[in-house]
Amino acid sequence: MKTISGLIMAAFLVITCTTVAVSADTPPLKKAEAIQKAGEELKADIRKLMTRFQGVIRANALIKAAGLSYQSALVADTANTSAYTTPKQQALMAGVYTFDATYAALFLKKKEVAQALKARRALADNLGIGMAMPPKIKKMVTQPETINNFETCAEAFDELLNQLVDEQLTSDERIITLMDGMFGAVTQGLYVVSESIAQAGYPKAMIELMDEQLSRVNFMILLLNVFQGQETFETALAMEPRLKVLESVKGLMEVTGDDTNKAKGEALPFMMGQVTQKEVDQIREIVTPLREKILAGNA
């Protein structure tokens, strides 16, 4: 597997579209300094992406505002963590449980928040990437009765994401694990929202929640595209099938304008209210089988 420094250099070039001048004649020390600098700048860029994801976490509040209720049947069973034995299974499910924790927090389901976070921690420990719990997350797990509002929970998840960025960008394997986890979380989010909309009878206010889900999808596409051209990572992250799923879902969420604009190749920005029951059901047809594979350990 390529070294982490090699990945960081390539990923940095993809994100920023800039170059680091390192020629064949550059002394080894200077080369190392240039690569280290690129890695530091990449880390900063990924932190920016994670900050964007923090906004997505807070956008979960729209789920409740739109009238959706907590559906325990839509979350993953926290008693099944021992069934996941491979690193990929564990990483994907850690992401699923992370979303489930934020979903439960939204409705102040204190016991369910603690259970999901404990399940996530168990998988992280099995992966060998267990970290000391950030103080706010630890309090949510050990003292769930103190969970009184969603904003406090969102701040705790922000703290966790920052720690992940700080501690997981240290090896190829850890980066793959982090990306698998993010994909699991995005998949579970799409599943919970689309199924909740269907169960509620497709009310317009709830259908408009797909706008918030588009942010999740675009975020994941952006993350995966960092690794384009890195064969080892493309394979490990199952990039081709994952991007195919994400682009298909994105296409159902976006409005591309009339035939004139299409002929010009111009895409209009997504407009809330344009997604209908038809698109929601098509998204469900894509996401539900994928989510079932993740939970079955077959993704």
Image (tube, helix red, strand yellow):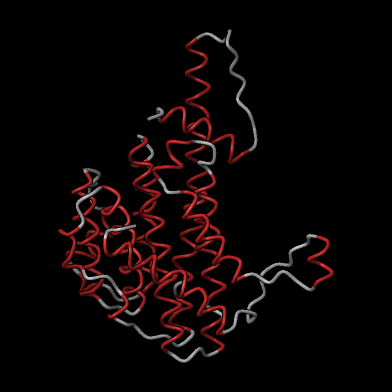
Identity of the residue drawn at 21% across and 56% down: 84
Identity of the residue drawn at 58% across and 7% down: 25
Percent x, y of residue 119: 21, 61
Can you say whether 88 is above or below 136 in the image? above
Image quadrant where residue 275 sits: bottom right
Left or right of 215, for residue 100:
left
Q: Nearer the viewer, residue 170 or 244?
A: 244
Quadrant where the C terminus lies?
bottom left
Q: Nearer the viewer, residue 173 or 151?
A: 173
Quadrant where the N terminus lies?
top left
Image quadrant where residue 257 sits: bottom right
Can you say whether 157 is above or below 200 in the image? above
Percent x, y of residue 55: 50, 63
Instruction: Please give the count of numbered marks on the rendered protein.
Output: 0
Left or right of 72, for residue 46:
right
Image quadrant where residue 185 sits: bottom left
Identity of the residue drawn at 78% across and 62% down: 266
Identity of the residue drawn at 51% across and 54% down: 243
Percent x, y of residue 49: 51, 51
Can you say whether 267 is above or below 165 in the image? below
Percent x, y of residue 116: 24, 66
Q: Nearer the viewer, residue 1 or 121?
A: 1
